[in-house]
Image: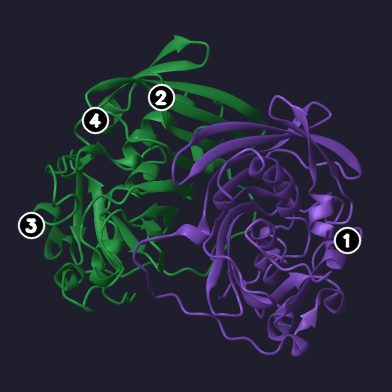
Chain colours: A purple, B green
């Protein structure tokens, strides 16, 4: 077992309900990472549908989850067909729903049909020349408690992006990075919806690195990843009145796109004047 | 009233349930357009939540809807907060759920917080020099019944993209277009989640123009549109084993991004050898 598998484990308690424990080891500031709590809900869905891989997952984050605390995931199977199954799940703590997931599962190993790819795999420097999270200090949750997720997920950031942060007019809302589990667990279809959400927000290029709550996150898992580091391309293009999109692509060692995500999130703090012009 | 408002109208029948009529005037081939039936479900959600605008909407399409037929929309309010409300809806015909929607609403006119935009508004030729849907013939549903949506929504396609279609190796999976309602109804936050799905699929640049069912569609409404034509930027980058992404951005006359969407859809027919290399 790995940290990911241990800390997203669910136990059936009947009637489509599953008991889980929300770990404190995947935090951003003083809340658990959204991708992590989503992974707990997905662990329950996976055991409730006949298809193995999450093709498309959408989560609406309603309230932060409590850490070191139990949770119940309630799964509603919606439809199971020959090629795909759709289900919904709600994760509840203390009687309050924390997140709602809507997902369609399929089998990425059984795909048939044409292929035509125009997207280009990103090119990055070696992970050894990129900046680890602890070296950069400010990413993420610099103003609050240490983000424990830094111990679970190994992230290496483009040093040029990191250097531009905090420089008036010098920061950009796009960067590339390497990402993998710290304990050596290979990435797979179950963990990609977490990994797309486990990098520092690209918006930190132009706003102070504080908690930016996600309203909604949608991930498409597009291929089963090859072993090894994944390359990430992260960008935000439209911060408008405090709301922003963030996109993440993950590419594997075989130059295949394995996941793409988009989220809608919100800047809680800084006033308009603290925001430098965004460039990507 | 407009065609859109008439044909997405819902009537309360109690207990969070709403009665609707699925029109035959928004078809693609012999099924109603997904964005249209989604708009029927959203009409019921809108009347069930305190906030006016859909900020983020995800729909999983389970089965095609029947046209010229009644439907019931069942709305589940999930959470209402100060700034946003989240709700789910299921649209049912003949006892079978056809689509499931998960949406968070807010107030786009009440936004506070910083702005920083790096995305660029697209430049297009005049709508008069672009190709109407009926002129192009093949878009969409060329192999089946006339797509009635062509009478409801006025679309003008980049003639260079249209010319490349069907040319071996010459088609691309990206195009620009103009779009507006045919009856002059202004676009607004309620109708943008339909308009992002009302253009021909960009995948028609490399596969035969037949029905490509959407598995999941997510739309972010980012601003209230100015009156007049909208400009659309549509692209597909990853067709893999028959599954593909499609992205759409809609821009208003004031050069503001008003909506962005991504969907995961499926090519039903053609064999691998009929697919030209994709270029965007």
Residue B2's mark?
Answer: 4
The picture places residue A149, in percent across and down from the top left corner, at 83, 62
Q: Are marks 3 and 4 on the same chain?
A: yes
Residue position marked by numbered label 1 in the rendering: A148
Mark 2 vs mark 3: which is more N-terminal?
Answer: 2
Q: Nearer the viewer, mark 2 or mark 3?
A: 2
Per the image, label 2 sits on a secondary structure element best described as strand
Residue position marked by numbered label 3 in the rendering: B135
Looking at the picture, tell me which residue is in the foreground, B228 or A189.
Answer: A189
Mark 3 vs mark 4: which is more N-terminal?
Answer: 4
Per the image, label 3 sits on a secondary structure element best described as helix
Residue at 47%, 16% (x, y): give it: B17
Whether residue A120 is visible, yes or no, is: yes
Q: Quadrant of the N terminus of chain A?
A: bottom right
Residue B96's mark?
Answer: 2
Residue contact between numbered discs 1 and 4, judged by CB atoms under 8 Å: no
Residue A201 placement, left or right of A123: right
The picture places residue B129, in percent across and down from the top left corner, at 12, 66
Looking at the picture, tell me which residue is in the foreground, A145 or B165.
Answer: B165
Per the image, label 4 sits on a secondary structure element best described as loop
Q: How packed is label 4: few (under 14 Cα within 10 Å), some, or many (20 or more)?
A: few
Residue A8 placement, left or right of A102: right
Residue at 65%, 41% (x, y): give it: A45
């Amino acid at each position: 077992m790995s940290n990911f598998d241990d800390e997203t484990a669910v136990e059936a308690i009947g009637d489509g309900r599953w008991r889980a424990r929300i770990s404190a080891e995947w935090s951003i500031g003083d809340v658990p990472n959204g991708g992590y709590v989503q992974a707990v809900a997905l662990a329950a869905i996976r055991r409730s549908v006949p298809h193995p891989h999450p093709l498309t997952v959408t989560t609406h984050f309603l309230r932060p989850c409590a850490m070191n605390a139990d949770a119940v995931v309630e799964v509603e199977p919606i439809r199971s067909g020959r090629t795909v199954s759709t289900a919904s799940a709600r994760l509840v703590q203390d009687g309050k729903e924390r997140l709602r997931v809507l997902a369609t599962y399929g089998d990425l190993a059984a795909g048939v049909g044409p292929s035509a790819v125009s997207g280009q795999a990103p090119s990055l420097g070696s992970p050894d020349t990129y900046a680890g999270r602890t070296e950069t200090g400010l990413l993420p949750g610099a103003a609050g408690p240490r983000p424990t997720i830094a111990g679970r997920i190994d992230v290496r950031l483009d040093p040029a992006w990191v250097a531009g942060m905090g420089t008036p007019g010098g920061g950009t809302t796009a960067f590339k990075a390497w990402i993998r589990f710290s304990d050596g667990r290979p990435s797979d279809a179950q963990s990609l919806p977490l990994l797309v959400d486990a990098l520092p927000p690209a918006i930190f290029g132009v706003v102070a690195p504080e908690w930016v709550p996600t309203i909604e996150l949608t991930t498409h898992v597009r291929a089963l990843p090859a072993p090894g580091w994944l390359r990430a391309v992260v960008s935000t293009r439209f911060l408008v009145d405090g709301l922003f999109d963030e996109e993440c692509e993950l590419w594997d060692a075989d130059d295949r796109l394995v996941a793409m995500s988009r989220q809608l999130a919100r800047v809680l703090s800084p006033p308009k004047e603290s925001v430098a012009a965004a460039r990507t």
